[in-house]
Amino acid sequence: MRLEFIVNDKKRVLEVAADKRLIDILREDLGLMGTKEGCGEGECGACTILLDGKAVHSCLLVAAQMPGRQVTTIEGLEKNGRLDPLQSAFVEEVAIQCGYCTPGMILSAKALLLENPAPTETEIRRALAGNICRCSGYTQIIRAVERAAREGGADI
Amino acid sequence: MSVKNYAPKNIEDLFSDLAKMTPKSKIIAGGTDLNISLHAGVVKPDALLYVGGINEMRQIVKTDGKVEIGAAATMSEIAKSRLLQEGLTAIADAAADVGSAQIRNNATIGGSVANASPAGDILVPLFLLKAEAVIANSKGELRRVPIPEVLLGPGKNSLCYDEAVIKFLLPLALPGQRSAFVKLGFRKAVTVARIGLAASLDMTEDGLIKAAEMMVGAISPVPLRIETAEQYMLGKRPDEIVETVGRMLSDLIIEKTPKEFDRDYKIGAACGAVDNLLKRFY
């Protein structure tokens, strides 16, 4: 099928199979390797992207669902050579160890801050409940999201 | 062979696209269940009909005596709807409890019914609140079917391959009526229901139950009414019936739940689930 959609603010037109998964389109057809596959069944959150501004699993979408929609991946957060406040806060707070869960974690947090710029810790934990980290633990991650919310201002 | 795809933008086009379906075709909305089977190769459709682009199927609106929930409305949209409060709260509660934020943003109510998981959270309030499904077919017809006739058992629905649920109709609750849903799982969030419990209660001004309906999910192939409890509650306060209603639920689990479906855990947890539910009413 012909797939026309927006990825990181850029229009993309591709010829793909209707049942090809979004994560595979992003990684194989568009070379956007920042999106990671963990479980492949919507349990781990590593493949989280923004679809029309909302956090969803890119492993649970296929091309047939994508025409006309807007996708943001981790590569799309940096603006004019500057990291998103969430990306900076993850670095500053050392909220990363192996980094595999980080893109998904940051995009779930981004979706939260887009809807709720000043979340409580409970709201952060709930928003990230679908993102599993098996090495650094969650304390630094929560701290990073709180910091981005506090210091990010208009950049969020 | 490549998979055909159809993406109607309105109900008229849906009718004509349904006419192109074969027994091997699949209707897709959020795809949170279907895409796992597709990727695993368990399901090999000849065509995918994506219904998420039909505006009418995404809306939640109030009409004459009813609230209509589009079959492609997501769990997030249902959880946030201002129309699903008071008597219809149970359905918003259940939607808010499904999976993770990522799943709730994508999974739809129609998909949940079509997928017919015994642990489907949203199915319990759909039964409780006497929802009807409006089903479209390839001949351009619409019919209304009570939810128990749509949902037949684990993974089984009564829809023909050229049919699609377009919306659900919920009768408006009576003034004073309230409902709630609670779920018991192995963790607080992102968990599969081991017990899903919903009640709709009508109470007098001094807090006595004058009408009650109660439904339990995840203990049997489809949600079950707890009729003994509905009778027993009448004329009593929610806070004084927890233990007895809890016992009635564990009796039902002993009767209905096969051992390999965490039966022993569920028997022990029944009273706590009832306590969580009834606390919502006082």
Image: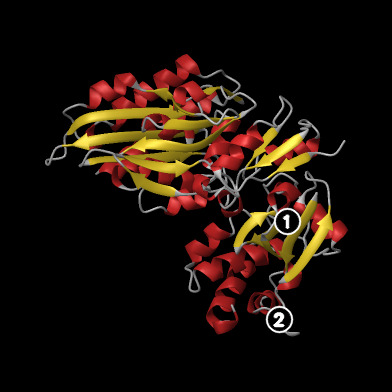
Q: Is residue A10 above or below residue B79?
A: below
Q: Residue furthest top?
A: B255
Q: Is residue A130 above or below residue B213?
A: below
Instruction: Indicate how the structure is coloured in the image.
Output: secondary structure
Q: Residue furthest left?
A: B206
Name which residue lies at 55% across and 49% down.
B104
Q: Is residue A62 visible?
A: no
List the residue tagged with mark 2.
A79
Name which residue lies at 55% across and 74% down.
A146
Which quadrant holds the N terminus of chain B? top right
Q: Say left or right for B271 vs A131.
A: left
Whole-percent x, y for residue B72 in the image: 54, 44
Q: Which residue is more in the foreground, B155 or B201? A: B155
Question: What amino acid does circle 1 point to?
Answer: Cys
Q: Secondary structure at mark 2?
A: loop
List the residue tagged with mark 1.
A47
Q: How busy is the neighbourhood of tag 2: few (under 14 within 10 Å), some, or many (20 plus)?
A: few
Whole-percent x, y for residue B204 in the image: 14, 37
Whole-percent x, y for residue A42 in the image: 68, 47
Q: Say left or right for B60 vs A11.
A: left
Q: How many marks?
A: 2
Q: Secondary structure at mark 1?
A: loop
Dot 2: chain letter: A
Residue B202 falls in which quadrant of the image?
top left
Residue A49 falls in which quadrant of the image?
bottom right
Q: Which residue is more in the foreground, B160 or B205? A: B160
Dot 1: chain letter: A
Question: What amino acid does circle 2 point to?
Answer: Lys
**Dots 2 and 1 on the same chain:** yes
How many angstroms separate mark 2 from mark 1 (CA)? 21 Å
